[in-house]
Amino acid sequence: MSFDRVLAKQVVGTAFKDGKLITLSVATETSYWKRSDSTVAPVAEVLERSLAGYRTPLPVGTTEIAVRESGHVSPADSRDHLTVVCIKESGDAETVHIPVSKN
């Protein structure tokens, strides 16, 4: 099965999760698409809000979460989760789906 590899990303902040400080980033280029820098901030807001309500532990060793979700063309194209890559201190990564907070 193929998947989007994150080729470029923009760090957008940090969050305290599972007793650790985690770097938050938004992919700006994957193996399938590119995102303009102007669209990073809205995606970052959704990530921060959704991660705050996410109670499931992240994969062990996660040091960074990168949103890999592609752009949605309209507000009517709503999503129920964000596709993120949990990047571990070892360099390995694991895809996780974080439910989108509606608040």
Image (spheres, helix red, strand yellow):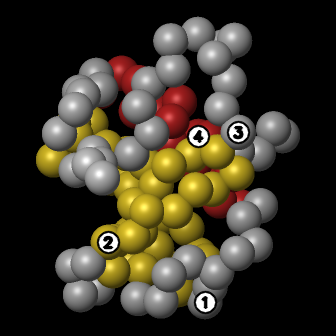
Give the mark toward the camera: 4 or 2.
2
Real-space CA distance between mark 1 and mark 2, rounded to the nearest whole angstrom:
19 Å
Residue designated by label 1: 19
Give the mark toward the camera: 1 or 2.
2
- Secondary structure category for the residue under label 2: strand
- Secondary structure category for the residue under label 4: helix
Labels 1 & 4 near each other (Cβ < 8 A): no
Q: Is residue 28 left or right of residue 74?
A: left
Residue 3 locus on image (x, y percent):
29, 48
Labels 3 & 2 near each other (Cβ < 8 A): no
Residue type pointed to by label 4:
Glu
Residue designated by label 2: 93
Real-space CA distance between mark 1 and mark 3, rounded to the nearest whole angstrom:
26 Å
User: Quick check: 54 above or below 42?
Assistant: below
Q: Is residue 80 left or right of residue 70?
A: right
Which badge, 3 or 2, comes first in the chain's sequence? 3
Residue 42 locus on image (x, y percent):
53, 30
Real-space CA distance between mark 3 and mark 2, rounded to the nearest whole angstrom:
22 Å
Which residue lies at the image location 41% right of the left edge and 88% below the top edge? 61
Residue type pointed to by label 2:
Ala
Residue designated by label 4: 45
Residue 16 locus on image (x, y percent):
59, 75
Q: Quadrant for the C terminus, please.
A: top right
- Closer to us: 42 or 76: 76
Real-space CA distance between mark 4 and mark 2, rounded to the nearest whole angstrom:
22 Å
Q: Residues within 10 Å of mark 2 (few under 14, many from 20)?
A: some
- Closer to us: 39 or 33: 33
Residue designated by label 3: 80
- Residue 64 falls in which quadrant of the image? bottom left
